[in-house]
Image: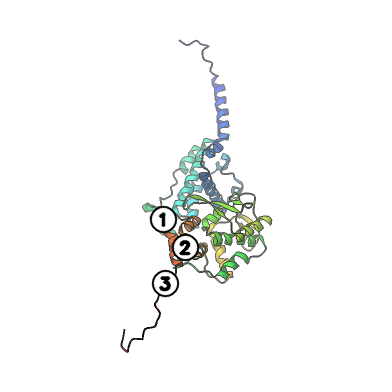
Amino acid sequence: MLDDHALSLPAPDTLARAAAAADQAAAHGVFARYRAELAAQTRRAQDADLARWQRYLTAVGVGEAKDAAWATEPSAWTHVTWGLVEGFLRWQETAGYSLASIARALATIRVYCIQATRAGTLSPEALALIQTVKAPAPRSKAGRNRDAQRTTTRRGAKKEAPTKLTATQVRRLKHEHAETPQGRRDAVLMCLLLDHGLRVSEVADLQVRDLDLERGLLRFYRRKVDATQTHRLTGDTLRAVRRYAAAGDLRTEGQVLRATTGPRAVNLGGPISIQGLRDRVRLLGQRVGVAGLSPHDCRHDWATRAARAGTDPLALQEAGGWSSLAMPRRYIEAAVIANERVKLAAADEEEPPDGGA
């Protein structure tokens, strides 16, 4: 039999207070502990997803979202509902994100909602409803059906072939911009597309922390192939970004490229969407005499120029962020002169007589 004094347990009210204090202390570090256990690449991927989440909320008029610390403050998630998360999926579909990308972003939102619930800032009831939100698997029947529906959101018919650019047009697209915040932003945009072949989603996801202007490097996440890459900025890109930063257009954190504050404004405000970037590229193309220019046309031009310059297929695959050699090989093969190694004998034979073959 245990002695009455062998164990010293706190009174019930004392235990309750101790438990509450322990929960509060633990909750304070929930996000920090969770993120500390992630691989650096996973953190970067989640940060890109959270930046997209913030752009969505800003786009639908949630003004306070721009100041929310989604990755560090559990309280930011207090009022998140399943309806907001469901809307996030629809917004991404409209913006043109792939089903795989949408599914990954949803997974990120869910995991932070779980951490917020553990921290006591999001109710278990709200979390339970959020977890009912599903994104169709890309290869499932529902996913294929959704993709078929998604093609109807394209503005106009799909182009049969990429729009080709001349060397003069490429030069003008990179350099002919007004000395305004909008103009300096446009110069950065076109250099990233034409000199680095980034996908439009990758440009939209770029964060200020991805830039190392002292070393002239850009380290960014390619969500389509789930890889983080580093590019050395070309001379034109580095000069454009440095002008952008020196003028105060580049914030200390957040998205690199931002939208203008109004339809006819030149000053920059909040985050810019993928569709906003597409619209801007199309307008800039019109200014240099190119109709219907798209970000993918710029990526195509970058790969074509690289292939013509003799870039190795493996190097082109790595720089372009392709998961296989199939696409780089197309550019390399298209750049080859088919009859380059054909040798013809001198035409010194007599012409065949009339009626000869």
Q: Which image quarter holds the C terminus?
A: bottom left
Q: Secondary structure at mark 3?
A: loop
- Residue at 45%, 46% (x, y): give it: 133
Q: Quadrant of residue 119?
A: top right
Q: Quadrant of residue 337?
A: bottom left
In space, the residues marked 2 and 3 are separated at their CA atoms by 39 Å
Q: Is residue 181 visible?
A: yes
Q: Which image quarter holds the N terminus?
A: top left
- Identity, as a three-letter code, of the amino acid under mark 3: Asn
Q: Which of the two labelled residues, at mark 2 and mark 1, occupies the earlier sequence position?
A: 1
In space, the residues marked 3 and 1 are separated at their CA atoms by 45 Å
Q: Nearer the viewer, mark 3 or mark 1?
A: 3
Residue 80 at x, y percent in the picture: 53, 44
Q: Compared with residue 41, is residue 9 higher up or lower down, i.e. above or below?
A: above
Residue 309 at x, y percent in the picture: 51, 64
- Identity, as a three-letter code, of the amino acid under mark 1: Arg
Kindly check if marks 2 and 3 are in contact, taking CB atoms under 8 A apart as contact.
no
Kindly check if marks 3 and 1 are in contact, taking CB atoms under 8 A apart as contact.
no
Q: Which residue is mark 1?
A: 146
Q: Which residue is mark 3?
A: 339
